[in-house]
Amino acid sequence: MDADFDAFLHPAPRLTIVALLAPADWTEFGFIRDTIGTSDSALSKQLSALAAEEYIEVRKQPASAGRRKLARLTPKGREAFARHAAALERIAVTARTARPAD
């Protein structure tokens, strides 16, 4: 297995969230939820797990209709995503160029 492969980050919900956050600064909870097509509770669970690993930062901000929850990648999360994406690319290249044994 590639040393940069991040088993914690690899499950589809987490990887999708981190990929969505990568090009952004602070991103609203509702946007993340709607974009990845998940429930509030499922997203909260994944955000909590990512925050516990210090891959993301979550904050609550007052809004006119209550409180808004925002998330962004930390430097650690950005580095983990970049390394994991590179590992996935190396795995894909190996699969595309591998020759079956005779």
Image (cartoon, rainbow, N blue to C red):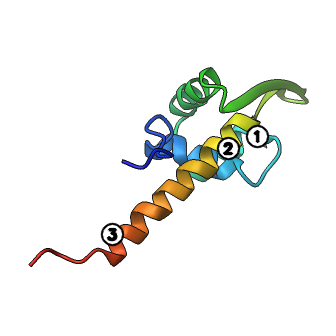
Q: Nearer the viewer, residue 20 or 85?
A: 85
Q: Which residue is mark 1?
A: 28
The answer to whether one can see residue 10 in this image is: yes
Q: Which quadrant would the C terminus be assigned to in this image?
A: bottom left
Q: Nearer the viewer, residue 68 or 98?
A: 98
Question: Which of the marked residues, 2 or 1, is nearer the chain's N terminus?
Answer: 1
Question: Which of the marked residues, 3 or 2, is nearer the chain's N terminus?
Answer: 2
**Mark 1 residue type:** Glu
Residue found 41% across the figure and 66% down from its top: 92
Whether pointer 2 and pointer 1 mark residues with C-beta atoms closer than 8 Å, the reply is no
Q: Which residue is mark 2?
A: 79
**Mark 3 residue type:** Ala
Mark whose residue sits in front, 1 or 3: 3
Counting from the top left corner in percent of width and height, residue 46 is at 54, 31
Counting from the top left corner in percent of width and height, residue 16 is at 55, 49
Label annotation for residue 95: 3
**Left or right relative to 79: residue 102:** left
**Left or right relative to 40: residue 94:** left
Whether pointer 3 and pointer 2 mark residues with C-beta atoms closer than 8 Å, the reply is no
**Mark 2 residue type:** Glu
State whether residue 95 is above or below residue 38: below
Give the CA separation, mark 2 to mark 1: 22 Å
Looking at this rendering, what residue extends furthest in the front direction?
102
Q: Secondary structure at mark 2?
A: helix
Give the CA separation, mark 3 to mark 2: 24 Å
Question: Which of the marked residues, 1 or 3, is nearer the chain's N terminus?
Answer: 1
Residue found 49% across the figure and 42% down from its top: 13
State whether residue 12 is above or below residue 29: below
Mark whose residue sits in front, 2 or 1: 2
